[in-house]
Image: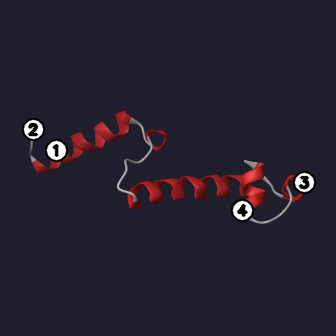
Amino acid sequence: MIDALARTYSCLPSHVLKHADTFDLMVFDVAMANMEIENAKANKKPVPSKYYKNVDLQAKIDRSREKSGVD
């Protein structure tokens, strides 16, 4: 991750190690995840399953069906 962060911001990995903190790493991680999700959507591919849990999706489907009265 440090190498990718350094490449993205055009600096040396040693500079990232010296100056970056955990907040920088978290922001970079979220930005990369968002970019991956948006690229999947743009290419009409499914969102990678590492970004959601099937249990959560099923709960949302169930709640939606309850609200609409569909079984």
Mark 2 touches mark 1? (CB < 8 Å): yes
Instruction: Looking at the picture, tell me which residue is in the foreground, 53 or 59.
Output: 53
Write down the residue under mark 3: 14
Residue 5 % position (x, y):
74, 56
User: Marks 3/1: CA distance?
Assistant: 53 Å
Q: Nearer the viewer, mark 1 or mark 4?
A: 4
Direction top: furthest residue: 55
CA gap between label 3 and label 2 equals 57 Å
Residue under numbered circle 4:
8
Depth check, mark 4 against mark 2: the one in front is 4
Image location of residue 38, percent across then percent down = 46, 59
Q: Residue placed farthest to the front in the image?
A: 43
Going by the numbered disc 1, the residue's amino acid type is: Arg
Q: Which residue corresponds to mark 1?
A: 65
What residue lies at 75% left-to-right and 59% top-to-bottom? Answer: 7
The span from disc 2 to disc 1 (Cα, nearest Å) is: 6 Å
Q: Report the residue at 40% width, 61% height from top.
A: 42
Q: Is residue 6 above or below residue 57?
A: below
Alpha carbon distance from label 3 to label 4? 14 Å
Q: Quadrant of residue 63?
A: top left
For residue 41, above or below residue 47: below
Which residue, given by chain and number where applicable, does mark 2 sit on?
71
Q: Mark 3 packing: few (<14 Cα in 10 Å), some, or many (20+)?
A: few
User: Looking at numbered disc 4 in the image, what kind of residue is underneath it?
Assistant: Thr
* Label located before the other in sequence (1 or 4): 4
Visual colour scheme = secondary structure
Q: CA distance from mark 1 to mark 4?
A: 43 Å
- Residue 34: where, in percent of width, then height? 52, 57
The structure residue drawn at horizontal position 16% and vertical position 44%, both measured from the top left corner, is 65
- Is there CB contact under 8 Å for labels 3 and 1? no
Estimate how packed mark 2 is, as few (under 14), some (14 to 19) or many (20 or more) residues with alpha carbons within 10 Å: few
The tag earlier along the polypeptide, 3 or 2, is: 3
